[in-house]
Amino acid sequence: MLIEGKWSGDWHPVQAKDKKGGFVRQQSTVRNFVTPDGENGFKAEAGRYHLYVALICPWASRTLAARKLKGLEDAISVSVVEPELGAEGWRFADRADAVNGARYVHEIYTKADPFYTGRATVPVLWDKQQGTIVNNESADILRIFNTGFGALARNDIDLYPEDLRRDIDALNEAVYHKLNNGVYRCGFATTQVAYEEAFHGVFEMLHELEKRLGKGPYLFCDRLTEADIRLFVTLIRFDAAYYGLFKANLRRIVDYPNLAAYQARLLEIPAFRETVNISHIKRGYYSIKSLNPSGIVPLGPEGPVLEATGI
């Protein structure tokens, strides 16, 4: 991680834990918003903003799906980091980042703040005009893409409709705690107690979602919302990584008829299918040395998910 702008030690997935030995996720620290009128200093303009992502990362993949659903591909450029996590965290391929000339994502953070302290995470929404980070919280970036770009975006789809906001927020909170972050709490637990608590939460939530998805094509009946994006990015990684590497191995997604059908339905939508890369996902997760010292990447699982190769 970065300490006062200097990289310190080798990258490790766990930076903090609770009294039970459970994984504690770092909170995002840069949370400005792009708006159509620029009232916060960040005005929606085509070509001004750049998105840094990792295709292994569910949080970053949320923003890629929203960017495509809202038709912002021409307005917001993208850089994709290498899937493997090295000693200095996320890195760019042989050629340095075209926007900032960086080799590692942590250099993006110190360009914005030379004394930054914290983890250098993705996604990052970058302002090329001001040379700084706008936001590094995926939940915020989802909503920025939904409404912050005004007429530059497609407005025939609303991922956070006003009449559903309270219900979306409640469902997001439950799914995040038990499932989105719950799988990480399984994988990075340092005690049996912490692992079992997280494990039970994961499968309690999958059971609830299996029942819910028996009522309609999406989480809110026939309306596709940000809640579907937030769930999908976890489901698509579950059988390939979380089931084995993270020990979330009671059942796979293919063992849930409604969840499996839901995942397949979303994969038919280009914004979902074209932002998934299973090769990156497996290479990235299985590069975490604390969980997989040998670095061996599994060949399975079989199934249509393996055909999703994305960008």
Image (cartoon, rainbow, N blue to C red):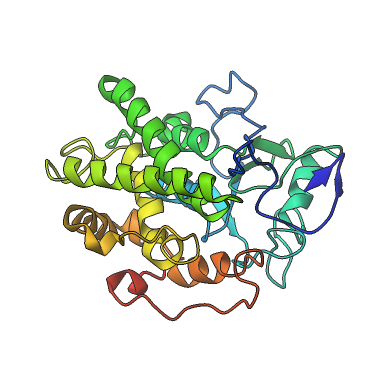
| Quarter-of-image position of residue 119 | top right
- Given residues 193 and 74, the one toward you in this image is 193
Above or below residue 303? Residue 216 is above
Name the residue furthest front.
193
Q: Is residue 159 above or below residue 307?
A: above
Provide residue 202's location: percent of width, then percent of height.
Answer: 38, 47
Residue at image point 41% right, 40% down: 178
| Residue 81 seen by the camera | yes
Q: Nearer the viewer, residue 140 or 85?
A: 85
Dividing the picture into quadrants, the one containing residue 293 is bottom right
Q: Position of residue 125 (x, y in %)?
A: 60, 42
Please tell me which residue is depicted at 63% across the width and 78% down the height of the picture.
Answer: 294
Q: Residue at x 67, y 32 (%)?
A: 29
**Residue 133 pos. (x, y %):** 68, 38
Q: Position of residue 159 (x, y in %)?
A: 33, 35
Q: How many marks?
A: 0
Q: Is residue 203 above or below residue 113?
A: below
Q: Is residue 70 visible?
A: no
Going by the image, does 70 lie left or right of 304?
right
Front residue of 13 and 58: 13
- Residue 62 versus residue 201: which sits nearer the camera? 201
Tell me the residue at 44%/67% (across/down): 244
Residue 219 in the figure: left or right of residue 17? left
Above or below residue 30? Residue 210 is below
